[in-house]
Image: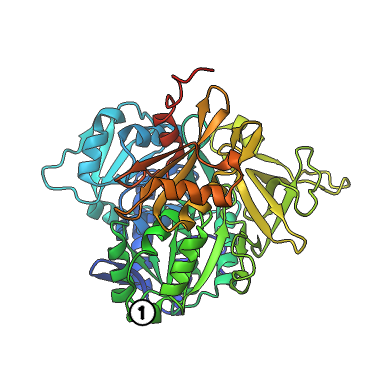
Amino acid sequence: MARLLHELIFEQAERNPAATAIVHQQTHSDYATLATLVQAVARGLLALDLNRGERIAVYLPKRLETVATLFGAARAGGVFVPINPLLKAEQVTHILRDCNVRILVTAQARAELLEPALTHCPDLHSLVLVDATPTTRRHVHHIQVIDWSELLTLDSRRSPTAAMIDIDMAAILYTSGSTGKPKGVVLSHRNMMAGAQSVVDYLGNHADDRILAILPFSFDYGLSQMTTAFSVGACVVLMDYLLPRDVVNTVVRERITGLAAVPPMWVQLAQQSWPEAAIDSLRYLTNSGGAMPRATLIALRRALPKTTPFLMYGLTEAFRSTYLPPTEIKRRPDSIGKAIPNAEILVVREDGSLCAPGEPGELVHRGALVALGYWNDPVNTAERFRPAPGQNPGLPLTELAVWSGDTVRSDEEGFLYFIGRKDDMIKTSGYRVSPTEVEEVLYSSGQVAEAAALGILHPTLGQAVVAVIKAMDGNFSENELIAQCKQHLPNFMVPLRVITRHEELPRGPNGKIDRKRLAEELRTLFQDLPP
């Protein structure tokens, strides 16, 4: 049985070598082909003097070379760092420097954009280009440049996985923080294997599944589409998200059975017309990265009556924490469910004691999925990874849990409900307001395609609730929207202002609405008001 991440591919190659593992555009690669490619990449990386635990970054869209490098790095004993292809040179350079990347795999055009900044990456010694030409330079600053095909011909006598065990590092995923630069979450092979198995347990994945990967691999939720599929020998169809209609067309063309997305994507997909072929093939859909608006869930269930929805909650520091069994959706559509298999979720007060049902508290996750910490960041690691509540005092070693920073509550039956992030909570007139609750009402109006509720500095209220929305169509009425809010929310939660945008709201690298950017743009909105 596989213990290390890359072993998933090699196991499937032995079990069913002709089964399709990856589909990218017109190319279909079976497990035998993928295993051979991963092995060649591992040999090439070792020939480039990669040492155990060193970092290999991949700055590419989804393609076969991306997959092969991630798993080839693991096979070689290295640590892969997937970089979102939407990031710009400044953010990419931060990641390369922060975790001391030794080898970068990318495309020529991307390398040219990075070139001025690569002088500030002294640990980087090799640049592998998937599309190098005969005229490509062999060196950029202090860095050697080689072609992808050349990498595959390199060989090394070193054993690729000597002495590796499942608690060794496998990946570093960078996640946005409340302040400062993104932090690198360090994941072990055990973390990722336990996560894949847990998801397979409750989704019921099997070898006949065809999973559409539209989320970036730099996002743990996106990376999970591959690890889940490979653990059961299923097929992954690679796609970089463009337009909602492209997703629908791909579901039909590739007979997709499983689709994962974040709420802003589901809001767009719920507005599409889904043909009968998609209705027949799509077995399940999953949501994480925020609460799915109830109106969106209703629209999706109406459009896809044969598809089972799984509503989930997760965080990069522990991959996935909860899911709501589909049988409970009608009874409690606003719940994020209960703990996934092989995890325990606690709701605790600031002093670490357990909250009573209905009492808001911080969500704490303990178990095999808890990450190893933040790369080279002991301060933030100590803040987020702390002793698990209620440990047996007889245990001499301390078990660390993830303290999520998210406020939740549980009902009498133990089902959890998301209230808001500590960082996102709005404090107005002495009240704490959950943006999620305001956004739910905005979406339920039927007039709003996208919405973000923000707390903007106000001279008398502390923060004012401001809604930034993209209207569903040209018949939008701000007065009707405010009336809807007044009908369903107490006065202190009703947006003081509604700001309408004609374009989509800005998103961060993981596809979530970029609240911090919107809040910064509106920072001076009320500055001229008298105190």
Q: Looking at the picture, does residue 256 appear above or below residue 77?
A: below
Q: Nearer the viewer, residue 223 or 487?
A: 487
353 sits left or right of 408 in the view: right
Query: Where does the image place residue 4, in percent across and percent down from the top left?
Result: 54, 60
390 sits left or right of 190 in the view: right
Query: Where does the image place residue 422, in percent across and percent down from the top left?
Result: 61, 38
The residue that appears at 21% across and 37% down in the rendered structure is 112
State the scheme by which the image is colored. Answer: rainbow
91 sits left or right of 429 in the view: left
The residue that appears at 61% across and 65% down in the rendered structure is 324
Query: Where does the image place residue 48, in percent across and percent down from the top left?
Result: 35, 45
Look at mark 1 in the image and give the residue it sits on: 18
Q: Looking at the picture, does residue 464 appear above or below residue 291?
A: above
94 sits left or right of 249 in the view: right
On the question of residue 268 being in view, the answer is yes
The residue that appears at 23% across and 36% down in the rendered structure is 113
Figure label count: 1
Residue 350 image-quadrant placement: top right
On the question of residue 82 being in view, the answer is no
Query: Where does the image place residue 13, in percent across and percent down from the top left?
Result: 42, 73
Structural crowding at the residue carrying mark 1, measured as other residues with C-alpha within 10 Å and reported as few (<14), some (14–19) or many (≥20): some
Q: Looking at the picture, does residue 375 appear above or below residue 213?
A: above
Report helix, strand or loop for mark 1: loop
Q: Quadrant of the C terminus?
A: top right
Q: Nearer the viewer, residue 274 or 366?
A: 274
Circle 1: residue type: Ala
